[in-house]
Image (cartoon, grey):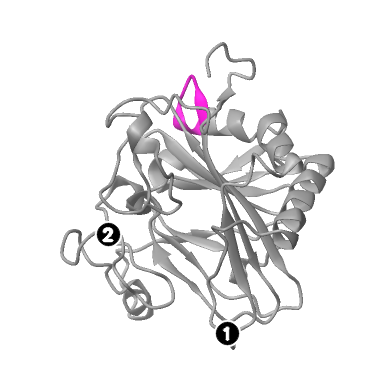
Amino acid sequence: MSYEIDGDYARDGAVCVRNAFSAEQIDLATAAIEANLADPSPLAKRASGPDDGAFVEDFCNWRRIPELEAFIRTSPAAEIAAHLTGSSTIRLYHDHMLTKEPGTKQRTPWHQDQPYYNVDGRRNVSMWLPVDPVPKASSLEFVAGTHTGPWYLPRTFLDGVAKWFPEGALEEFPDIDAALAAGDDRWRIVSWELEPGDAVFFDFLTVHGAAGMPGPGRRRVLSVRFLGDDMVHAPRPWTTSPPFAGLADELPAGVPMEHPDFPMLWPPHPTTA
Protein backbone atom coordinates (compact mmCIF):
# COMPACT_ATOMS: atom_id res chain seq x y z
CA MET A 1 0.00 0.00 0.00
CA SER A 2 1.26 3.48 -0.85
CA TYR A 3 -0.66 5.70 1.56
CA GLU A 4 1.07 8.25 3.80
CA ILE A 5 0.05 9.02 7.39
CA ASP A 6 0.18 12.70 8.36
CA GLY A 7 0.11 13.07 12.15
CA ASP A 8 0.53 10.97 15.29
CA TYR A 9 -2.50 8.80 16.06
CA ALA A 10 -1.39 7.70 19.54
CA ARG A 11 -0.68 11.30 20.60
CA ASP A 12 -3.54 13.19 18.96
CA GLY A 13 -6.29 10.63 18.39
CA ALA A 14 -6.60 11.71 14.74
CA VAL A 15 -4.49 11.54 11.58
CA CYS A 16 -4.81 12.30 7.89
CA VAL A 17 -4.07 9.40 5.56
CA ARG A 18 -2.99 10.70 2.16
CA ASN A 19 -3.56 8.82 -1.10
CA ALA A 20 -5.37 6.06 0.78
CA PHE A 21 -7.91 5.28 -1.94
CA SER A 22 -7.74 4.84 -5.70
CA ALA A 23 -9.89 6.68 -8.23
CA GLU A 24 -11.97 3.52 -8.68
CA GLN A 25 -12.56 3.28 -4.92
CA ILE A 26 -13.58 6.95 -4.78
CA ASP A 27 -16.01 6.27 -7.64
CA LEU A 28 -17.53 3.44 -5.57
CA ALA A 29 -17.87 5.70 -2.53
CA THR A 30 -19.39 8.48 -4.64
CA ALA A 31 -21.92 6.10 -6.20
CA ALA A 32 -22.81 4.83 -2.72
CA ILE A 33 -23.40 8.36 -1.42
CA GLU A 34 -25.53 9.34 -4.41
CA ALA A 35 -27.58 6.14 -4.11
CA ASN A 36 -28.14 6.92 -0.43
CA LEU A 37 -29.20 10.52 -1.15
CA ALA A 38 -31.62 9.29 -3.83
CA ASP A 39 -33.17 6.70 -1.50
CA PRO A 40 -32.70 7.63 2.18
CA SER A 41 -33.32 5.05 4.88
CA PRO A 42 -35.70 5.53 7.83
CA LEU A 43 -32.65 6.59 9.88
CA ALA A 44 -31.88 9.56 7.60
CA LYS A 45 -32.16 13.02 9.11
CA ARG A 46 -31.58 16.64 8.27
CA ALA A 47 -29.04 18.16 10.67
CA SER A 48 -29.54 21.78 9.52
CA GLY A 49 -32.47 24.13 9.95
CA PRO A 50 -35.21 24.46 7.32
CA ASP A 51 -33.87 27.86 6.24
CA ASP A 52 -30.23 26.76 5.97
CA GLY A 53 -28.86 24.88 2.97
CA ALA A 54 -28.92 21.15 3.56
CA PHE A 55 -26.88 19.01 5.92
CA VAL A 56 -28.11 15.44 5.49
CA GLU A 57 -27.04 12.31 7.38
CA ASP A 58 -27.92 8.64 7.07
CA PHE A 59 -26.71 5.46 8.76
CA CYS A 60 -26.35 1.69 8.38
CA ASN A 61 -26.98 1.23 4.65
CA TRP A 62 -24.25 -1.23 3.68
CA ARG A 63 -26.66 -4.15 3.27
CA ARG A 64 -28.94 -2.38 0.77
CA ILE A 65 -26.44 -0.33 -1.31
CA PRO A 66 -24.11 -2.67 -3.24
CA GLU A 67 -21.51 0.03 -3.96
CA LEU A 68 -21.27 0.80 -0.26
CA GLU A 69 -20.71 -2.82 0.73
CA ALA A 70 -18.16 -3.22 -2.07
CA PHE A 71 -16.21 -0.18 -0.88
CA ILE A 72 -16.22 -1.34 2.73
CA ARG A 73 -15.09 -4.88 1.88
CA THR A 74 -12.56 -4.18 -0.88
CA SER A 75 -10.93 -0.84 -0.04
CA PRO A 76 -7.86 -0.59 2.24
CA ALA A 77 -9.92 1.15 4.96
CA ALA A 78 -10.07 -1.87 7.28
CA GLU A 79 -6.36 -2.56 6.88
CA ILE A 80 -5.58 1.06 7.79
CA ALA A 81 -7.89 0.71 10.80
CA ALA A 82 -5.98 -2.41 11.91
CA HIS A 83 -2.67 -0.59 11.57
CA LEU A 84 -3.78 2.50 13.50
CA THR A 85 -5.42 0.58 16.35
CA GLY A 86 -2.80 -2.17 16.58
CA SER A 87 -5.54 -4.76 16.11
CA SER A 88 -5.27 -8.24 14.63
CA THR A 89 -8.94 -8.16 13.61
CA ILE A 90 -11.30 -5.43 12.43
CA ARG A 91 -15.10 -5.58 12.31
CA LEU A 92 -17.48 -3.15 10.70
CA TYR A 93 -19.47 -1.16 13.25
CA HIS A 94 -21.53 1.01 10.92
CA ASP A 95 -21.50 3.32 7.92
CA HIS A 96 -22.52 6.98 8.06
CA MET A 97 -23.19 9.28 5.10
CA LEU A 98 -22.85 13.05 5.66
CA THR A 99 -23.52 15.61 2.94
CA LYS A 100 -23.35 19.39 3.28
CA GLU A 101 -24.67 21.18 0.24
CA PRO A 102 -23.20 24.57 -0.82
CA GLY A 103 -24.47 27.43 1.27
CA THR A 104 -25.03 25.35 4.43
CA LYS A 105 -24.12 27.52 7.41
CA GLN A 106 -24.80 24.88 10.07
CA ARG A 107 -21.67 24.03 12.00
CA THR A 108 -21.19 20.49 13.22
CA PRO A 109 -20.71 21.31 16.92
CA TRP A 110 -17.87 19.95 19.02
CA HIS A 111 -18.73 16.42 20.11
CA GLN A 112 -17.40 12.92 20.74
CA ASP A 113 -18.87 9.89 18.99
CA GLN A 114 -18.26 7.30 21.71
CA PRO A 115 -21.04 8.46 24.11
CA TYR A 116 -23.66 7.94 21.38
CA TYR A 117 -22.65 4.30 20.84
CA ASN A 118 -23.47 0.87 22.28
CA VAL A 119 -19.88 -0.38 22.34
CA ASP A 120 -17.00 -0.03 24.79
CA GLY A 121 -13.25 -0.47 24.35
CA ARG A 122 -10.24 1.49 23.21
CA ARG A 123 -9.26 -0.12 19.88
CA ASN A 124 -11.65 1.67 17.58
CA VAL A 125 -11.40 4.13 14.73
CA SER A 126 -13.64 6.14 12.41
CA MET A 127 -12.81 6.94 8.81
CA TRP A 128 -14.07 10.25 7.33
CA LEU A 129 -13.66 10.11 3.55
CA PRO A 130 -14.73 13.07 1.40
CA VAL A 131 -15.31 12.39 -2.28
CA ASP A 132 -15.10 16.14 -3.05
CA PRO A 133 -12.16 18.46 -2.39
CA VAL A 134 -12.55 19.93 1.09
CA PRO A 135 -10.79 23.20 1.99
CA LYS A 136 -9.30 23.32 5.46
CA ALA A 137 -11.91 25.91 6.51
CA SER A 138 -14.70 23.34 5.97
CA SER A 139 -12.79 20.21 6.98
CA LEU A 140 -13.24 18.19 10.15
CA GLU A 141 -11.33 19.67 13.10
CA PHE A 142 -10.06 17.69 16.08
CA VAL A 143 -9.07 18.69 19.59
CA ALA A 144 -5.78 16.82 19.85
CA GLY A 145 -5.39 14.43 22.78
CA THR A 146 -9.05 14.31 23.84
CA HIS A 147 -9.24 10.60 22.94
CA THR A 148 -7.80 9.92 26.40
CA GLY A 149 -10.98 11.30 28.01
CA PRO A 150 -13.04 12.38 29.77
CA TRP A 151 -16.41 11.58 28.20
CA TYR A 152 -18.52 14.71 27.67
CA LEU A 153 -22.32 14.82 27.73
CA PRO A 154 -23.65 14.26 24.18
CA ARG A 155 -26.47 16.52 22.98
CA THR A 156 -28.54 16.82 19.82
CA PHE A 157 -26.90 19.09 17.28
CA LEU A 158 -29.81 21.43 16.51
CA ASP A 159 -31.48 21.94 19.89
CA GLY A 160 -28.87 20.83 22.46
CA VAL A 161 -31.06 18.20 24.16
CA ALA A 162 -29.42 15.50 26.31
CA LYS A 163 -31.16 12.48 24.72
CA TRP A 164 -28.58 9.83 25.56
CA PHE A 165 -27.20 10.36 29.07
CA PRO A 166 -29.23 12.14 31.78
CA GLU A 167 -28.34 15.74 32.60
CA GLY A 168 -25.36 15.75 34.96
CA ALA A 169 -24.32 12.17 34.18
CA LEU A 170 -21.19 13.28 32.30
CA GLU A 171 -19.06 16.41 32.18
CA GLU A 172 -20.42 19.31 30.17
CA PHE A 173 -18.39 20.42 27.18
CA PRO A 174 -16.02 23.28 27.92
CA ASP A 175 -16.46 26.38 25.74
CA ILE A 176 -13.66 25.43 23.38
CA ASP A 177 -14.35 28.25 20.91
CA ALA A 178 -14.21 30.92 23.62
CA ALA A 179 -11.02 29.41 25.00
CA LEU A 180 -9.39 29.42 21.58
CA ALA A 181 -10.47 33.01 20.95
CA ALA A 182 -8.91 33.99 24.27
CA GLY A 183 -5.63 32.32 23.33
CA ASP A 184 -5.99 29.44 25.79
CA ASP A 185 -3.28 26.95 24.84
CA ARG A 186 -4.90 23.97 26.60
CA TRP A 187 -6.62 23.08 23.32
CA ARG A 188 -4.67 22.22 20.18
CA ILE A 189 -6.69 21.93 16.97
CA VAL A 190 -5.58 19.71 14.08
CA SER A 191 -7.23 19.58 10.66
CA TRP A 192 -6.29 19.05 7.04
CA GLU A 193 -7.24 20.20 3.57
CA LEU A 194 -8.35 17.07 1.74
CA GLU A 195 -8.47 15.88 -1.85
CA PRO A 196 -10.37 12.83 -3.12
CA GLY A 197 -8.32 9.82 -2.07
CA ASP A 198 -7.38 11.37 1.29
CA ALA A 199 -9.22 10.54 4.51
CA VAL A 200 -9.01 11.32 8.19
CA PHE A 201 -9.10 8.55 10.79
CA PHE A 202 -9.92 9.27 14.43
CA ASP A 203 -10.72 7.64 17.75
CA PHE A 204 -14.41 7.44 18.76
CA LEU A 205 -13.60 9.62 21.79
CA THR A 206 -11.67 12.40 20.02
CA VAL A 207 -13.54 15.70 20.22
CA HIS A 208 -14.28 16.99 16.73
CA GLY A 209 -16.48 19.40 14.79
CA ALA A 210 -16.66 21.22 11.45
CA ALA A 211 -17.72 24.51 9.96
CA GLY A 212 -20.45 24.93 7.38
CA MET A 213 -19.96 24.66 3.62
CA PRO A 214 -20.23 28.15 2.09
CA GLY A 215 -19.63 26.82 -1.41
CA PRO A 216 -19.34 26.68 -4.26
CA GLY A 217 -18.61 22.95 -3.91
CA ARG A 218 -20.46 20.20 -2.08
CA ARG A 219 -19.01 18.25 0.82
CA ARG A 220 -20.07 14.62 0.40
CA VAL A 221 -18.52 12.30 2.96
CA LEU A 222 -18.62 8.57 3.57
CA SER A 223 -17.72 7.71 7.15
CA VAL A 224 -17.14 4.13 8.30
CA ARG A 225 -16.65 3.06 11.93
CA PHE A 226 -14.39 0.12 12.74
CA LEU A 227 -14.09 -2.13 15.82
CA GLY A 228 -10.73 -3.56 16.83
CA ASP A 229 -9.63 -6.34 19.15
CA ASP A 230 -11.02 -5.18 22.51
CA MET A 231 -14.39 -3.73 21.47
CA VAL A 232 -17.41 -5.24 23.22
CA HIS A 233 -21.16 -4.79 23.35
CA ALA A 234 -22.38 -2.16 25.83
CA PRO A 235 -26.19 -2.08 25.80
CA ARG A 236 -27.62 1.27 26.90
CA PRO A 237 -30.98 1.91 28.58
CA TRP A 238 -31.78 4.44 25.82
CA THR A 239 -31.81 4.42 22.04
CA THR A 240 -28.27 4.86 20.74
CA SER A 241 -27.28 6.73 17.59
CA PRO A 242 -27.44 4.81 15.37
CA PRO A 243 -29.90 2.41 16.99
CA PHE A 244 -29.50 -1.37 16.79
CA ALA A 245 -33.00 -2.59 17.63
CA GLY A 246 -33.13 -6.00 19.29
CA LEU A 247 -29.37 -6.42 19.56
CA ALA A 248 -29.47 -6.49 23.36
CA ASP A 249 -31.64 -9.62 23.11
CA GLU A 250 -28.99 -11.38 21.03
CA LEU A 251 -25.68 -10.19 22.50
CA PRO A 252 -25.06 -9.93 26.26
CA ALA A 253 -23.15 -6.99 27.70
CA GLY A 254 -19.37 -7.29 27.58
CA VAL A 255 -19.06 -9.80 24.74
CA PRO A 256 -17.34 -9.20 21.36
CA MET A 257 -19.54 -7.95 18.53
CA GLU A 258 -19.77 -11.38 16.87
CA HIS A 259 -22.97 -10.84 14.92
CA PRO A 260 -23.92 -10.66 11.21
CA ASP A 261 -24.58 -6.92 11.53
CA PHE A 262 -20.86 -6.41 12.27
CA PRO A 263 -18.96 -8.51 9.73
CA MET A 264 -15.26 -9.24 10.02
CA LEU A 265 -13.32 -7.15 7.49
CA TRP A 266 -9.71 -7.84 8.48
CA PRO A 267 -8.04 -10.23 7.90
CA PRO A 268 -9.71 -10.22 4.47
CA HIS A 269 -10.72 -13.91 4.49
CA PRO A 270 -12.14 -14.58 7.96
CA THR A 271 -13.27 -17.99 9.09
CA THR A 272 -15.86 -16.65 11.56
CA ALA A 273 -19.00 -14.56 11.16
Location of residue 249 with respect to 11 vertically, above or below? above
Q: Report the side of 24 relative to 40 (left or right).
A: right
Location of residue 74 with respect to 184 vertically, above or below? above
- Category of crowding for the residue at label 2, using alpha-carbon neighbours closer than 10 angstroms: few (below 14), some (14–19), many (at least 20): many
Residue 27, image x, y percentages: 82, 47
Residue 124, image x, y percentages: 43, 37
Q: Check whether the beta carbons of the residues at disc 1 and disc 2 lie within 8 A of each other.
A: no
Q: Report the side of 252 relative to 68 (left or right).
A: left
Camera-side mark, 1 or 2: 1
Q: Report the side of 142 relative to 105 (left or right).
A: left
For the view shown, which residue lies furthest in the left direction? 168
Residue 116 seen in the current view: yes
109 within the magenta span:
no
Say which residue label 2 marks.
152
At 52% from the left and 28% from the top, the residue drawn is 260
Give the magenta-colored segment's residue range: 84-91
Residue 52, image x, y percentages: 60, 84
Residue 118 placement: quadrant: top left
Residue 219 placement: quadrant: bottom right
Residue 231 seen in the current view: no
At 39% from the left and 58% from the top, the residue drawn is 207
Residue 193, image x, y percentages: 65, 61
Q: CA distance from mark 1 to mark 2?
A: 28 Å
Amino acid on which the number 2 mark rests in the picture? Tyr
At 30% from the left and 46% from the top, the residue drawn is 148
Say which residue label 1 marks.
50
Q: Nearer the viewer, residue 268 or 255?
A: 255
Location of residue 257 with respect to 189 vertically, above or below? above
Q: Secondary structure at mark 1?
A: loop
